[in-house]
């Protein structure tokens, strides 16, 4: 954008130093789109129209139903308070309710599902959530709910035979733990051959993310990245209360997985430097080249990147993203077929003036 291109797109091969999971690996492919003088709503429309354009091919290949636009849009705070996740799976219910009276947050599992869950299933679920989050959830039948939890029942309105899953508290930590329980219990129900997920593909946008959050040391860090712009309505809080700043960041979610993300960028060099030095407490000298470039004149701009491998994996219902990649990487990042990565010969490194010390060629 700074160099004068008003827009571009690229199919980009990306490398990220991340722990491998079923939905990600170190090497992946993105459709990257960046544009000047753009708004989040323009991005929504472009991506939705792109998916509409390719959908006849997806339909003819998979035999799925049409998709409709515009996609559902949900604010981050609503996603967390109702689903306990910033990438909610909206194919099934189990929405949260919070009781300010007794301080519990919970959801109920209808009898048609709960009757198929054993005590061992529920115990394993409680243990899994505790092991991964450090938070304890409770699961009771309606009849066994204690009197100090009755206000939550009034909100959930469970019927006889339903199970109630709840946790004490309503902070992001507790909501994420309950959100994990919600997702895992749905997987458990599905594994028993019960129909819980609505069919087809459910796309939605998540927006209105906070721009900053505190790390374990109590220091501010960017929720998305430090180049994300603040919303015009909350930008003034940059200088008084960063916790109240909403970022112009948006994620595209499909069936409970993030398949794309982007933002409108900071284009004012003074604002960008303030974020680096005063909020994030980073050394702006390392980014001086970038600040100089912004100072030369950058238009308002933004974009988005879609994870093509992950999208295809969702479309074909693959168990792992590696099932749709020609040369997938193992959990440790190695390509077992090609035997890569390998050490680069010193002769080749010297051509690029690179020196690597303290390495073995085992």
Image (cartoon, grey):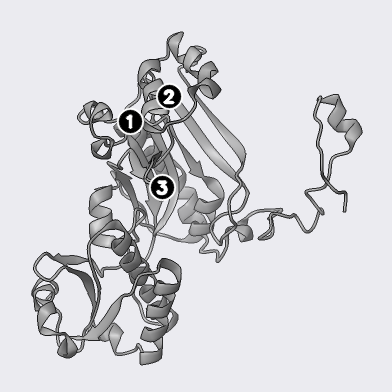
- The image quarter containing residue 246 is top left
Residue 128: % across, % down? 43, 75
Residue position marked by numbered label 2 in the rendering: 35
Asked whether, in this view, residue 192 is left or right of residue 234, the answer is right
Q: Residue 195, how many percent across, how many down?
A: 35, 77
Q: Is residue 281 above or below residue 325?
A: above
Rounded to the nearest angstrom, the CA distance separating label 3 from label 1 is 37 Å
Residue drawn at x 45%, y 17% is 6
First in sequence, mark 3 or 1: give its number. Answer: 1
Observer-nearest of 93 and 102: 102
Is there any visible trace of residue 198 in the rendered image?
A: no
Number of numbered markers: 3
Q: Are marks 3 and 2 in contact (CB under 8 Å)?
A: no
Name the residue nearer the viewer: 285 or 139: 285
Look at the picture and state if 219 lies above or below 282.
Answer: below
Residue 219 sits above or below residue 156 on the image:
above
Q: Residue at x 26, y 58 (%)?
A: 171
Earlier in the chain: of badge 3 and badge 2, it is 2
- Report the residue marked by disc 1: 42
Query: Residue farthest to the front?
Result: 217
Disc with the residue nearer the chain's start (1 vs 2):
2
| 3D distance between C-alphas at marks 1 and 2 | 10 Å
Residue farthest along the right direction in this orientation: 347
131 up-or-down from 227: above or below = below
Q: Residues within 10 Å of mark 3 (few under 14, many from 20)?
A: few
Circles 1 and 2: CB atoms closer than 8 Å? yes
């Amino acid at each position: 954008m700074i160099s004068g291109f008003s827009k571009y797109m690229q199919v980009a091969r990306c490398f990220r130093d991340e722990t491998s999971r079923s939905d990600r690996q170190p090497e992946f492919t993105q459709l990257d789109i960046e544009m000047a003088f753009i708004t989040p709503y323009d991005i929504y429309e472009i991506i939705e129209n792109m998916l509409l354009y390719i959908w006849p091919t997806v339909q003819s290949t998979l035999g799925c139903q049409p998709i409709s636009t515009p996609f559902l849009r949900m604010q981050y705070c609503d996603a967390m308070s109702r689903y306990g996740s910033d990438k909610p799976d909206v194919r099934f219910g189990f929405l949260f309710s919070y009781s300010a009276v007794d301080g519990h947050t919970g959801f109920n599992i209808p009898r048609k599902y709960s009757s198929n869950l054993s005590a061992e299933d529920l115990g394993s679920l409680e243990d899994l959530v505790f092991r991964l989050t450090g938070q304890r959830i409770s699961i009771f039948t309606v009849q066994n709910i204690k009197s100090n939890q009755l206000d939550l029942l009034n909100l959930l309105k469970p019927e006889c035979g339903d199970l109630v899953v709840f946790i004490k508290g309503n902070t992001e930590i507790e909501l994420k733990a309950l959100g994990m329980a919600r997702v895992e219990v749905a997987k458990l129900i599905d594994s028993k051959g019960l129909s819980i997920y609505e069919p087809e593909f459910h796309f939605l946008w998540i927006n209105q993310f906070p721009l900053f959050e505190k790390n374990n040391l109590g220091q501010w860090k960017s929720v998305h990245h430090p180049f994300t712009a603040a919303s015009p309505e909350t930008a003034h809080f940059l200088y008084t209360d960063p916790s109240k700043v909403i970022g112009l960041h948006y994620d595209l979610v499909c069936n409970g997985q993030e398949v794309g993300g982007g933002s409108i960028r900071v284009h004012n060099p003074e604002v960008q430097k303030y974020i680096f030095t005063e909020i994030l407490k980073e050394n702006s000298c390392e980014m001086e080249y970038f600040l100089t470039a912004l100072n030369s004149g950058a238009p308002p701009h933004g974009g988005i990147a879609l994870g093509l491998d992950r999208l295809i994996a969702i479309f074909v219902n693959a168990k792992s993203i590696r099932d749709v990649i020609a040369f997938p990487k193992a959990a440790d990042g190695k390509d077992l077929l090609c035997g890569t990565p390998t050490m680069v010969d010193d002769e080749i490194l010297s051509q690029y003036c690179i020196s690597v010390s303290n390495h073995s060629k085992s």
